[in-house]
Image (tube, rainbow, N blue to C red):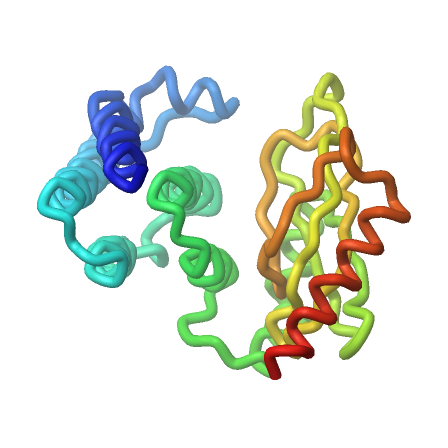
Amino acid sequence: MKETIVNNTILALEKLKSTEKFSSEEWENRGLNSSEKSLCITLENSFNDLLTNLISANNTKKSDKEIENIFERHFKEIKSDELDTEEKEFVLDYFAEIATILNIRSINEKLNFWTYGIEAYDHEEVERKASEKILAEEKKRHEILSILCQKCKVQLETFILERDNEIPTFEFDIIKCIKCSELNILDKGCGIKRYRFLNYELIEELSKEEYDLPKALQRLEQLKMRIKATE
């Protein structure tokens, strides 16, 4: 089973590597004009180097931690302050796609910090910068779904990057506040094609084919009780 997962991971990485990730067509698909050719070449080479190293690491059965370190090293080599907002989002989407292939949830937090210009996690600093500048700017550009953590009352925010009204609502999300670790339930609703989140991490997705809201809330309480039992 594990061998199959590794093989599927390698195939997905090789497929992404074989595509021209920063071609004019890809920029057009995002409704944007292509950036300078030199930048596109630099980004293309950088991602191909990352993908080559990840493919090699999976082939040689490196540990998850070693693979994550490779990802982070390349991630930190990107000079985000030299990219405009659209370029940064484009790059982040590819990092997020690779993280999904690798199944590294923890990297999502680092992606969010990079998005909002925060180098190291400090919750008070996150709140201050978000309220004063960063989130204010993002709110002008993106729709934001926000709920309060039931325990610490911090804003758990979902940035809607792209909508498609034909996409139905599939699931309830059980999410964990990164400030206090409290579990909360989130219903993003329908029509969401791409999104990024801040101040929480995804724990479990509950299909609406199996769960209505009462059942989802019951599952939430089960997980909370399980956590308490291990404390």
Indicate the position of residue 87 as horizontal and vertical percent values: 40, 41
Instruction: Return the residue nearer the eye: 204 or 154.
Output: 204
Quadrant in the picture for residue 218: bottom right
Indicate the position of residue 47 as horizontal and vertical percent values: 23, 40
Image quadrant occupied by the C terminus = bottom right
Quadrant in the picture for residue 153: bottom right
Compared with 90, 66 (above or below) is: below
Residue drawn at x 24%, y 27% is 11
Left or right relative to 37: residue 132: right
Instruction: Return the residue nearer the eye: 6 or 229.
Output: 229
- Residue farthest to the right? 214
Residue drawn at x 60%, y 41% is 195
Residue drawn at x 47%, y 55% is 108
Indicate the position of residue 106 as horizontal and vertical percent values: 44, 60
Residue 45 seen: yes
Residue drawn at x 79%, y 76% is 151
